[in-house]
Image (spheres, rainbow, N blue to C red):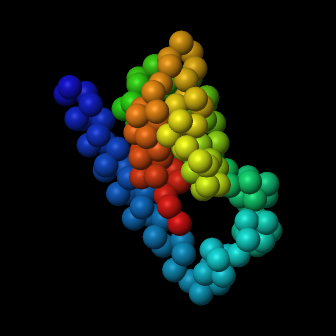
Amino acid sequence: MRIRITMASVVAVLAVTVVGCGSDKGGDATSEPAKSATPEASATAGGGGEAKGTGIPPEPTGAERDAVLAAVHDVNGKLTHDEDRAIDAARNQCASLDGGAKDPDHDAAQRFSYDGVTLTDEDGGHINFGLRKTLCPES
């Protein structure tokens, strides 16, 4: 129980840090049109390549990566033994969340059920909550 509280606290602090850092990026007038543009136009305008056009965010680094891993770890610690796999699953889940998936909680449960771990749709909902606070906030 103490680990869950500690992890939740770490996730909260990192989420605030990431959100605080991210708020400076959209402050100038030139970045506003890209937010309302089509995904294809955003990919071209932002120079992000295919990843932006597909709804998959760039691979997180530093504190943002730690926050994503902490959010996934909070649901099930075994999911972060292979950090790269957890990050890949998280990035792909962002595309599902932003792409209007019918049942994103189920999608997350399926996407993160690996290495002998089987998640429920409720677990998937917790993962989605963590991803919305870290890697893929609602736009």
Asked whether 100 or 26 is in front, the reply is 100
In the rendered view of the protein, which quadrant contains the N terminus? top left
x and y percentages locating residue 135 in the rendered image: 51, 50
- In the picture as drawn, the residue positioned furthest to the left comes out as 2
Tell me: residue 7, above or below residue 15.
above
- In the picture as drawn, the residue positioned furthest to the top comes out as 116
x and y percentages locating residue 18 in the rendered image: 43, 57
Tell me: residue 5, above or below residue 43.
above
In the rendered image, which quarter is residue 71 located in? top left
Q: Is residue 73 left or right of residue 85?
A: left
**Residue visible at 49% across and 58% down in the picture:** 137
**Residue visible at 71% across and 58% down in the picture:** 52
- In the picture as drawn, the residue positioned furthest to the front comes out as 102
> Looking at the image, can residue 40 be seen?
yes
> Looking at the image, can residue 58 be seen?
no
Numbered circles on residues, count? 0
In the rendered image, which quarter is residue 112 located in? top right
x and y percentages locating residue 12 in the rendered image: 31, 49
Tell me: residue 9, above or below residue 58.
above
**Residue visible at 65% across and 77% down in the picture:** 36
**Residue visible at 42% across and 52% down in the picture:** 133
x and y percentages locating residue 8 in the rendered image: 29, 40
Q: Is residue 102 left or right of residue 78?
A: right
Q: Is residue 43 left or right of residue 13?
A: right
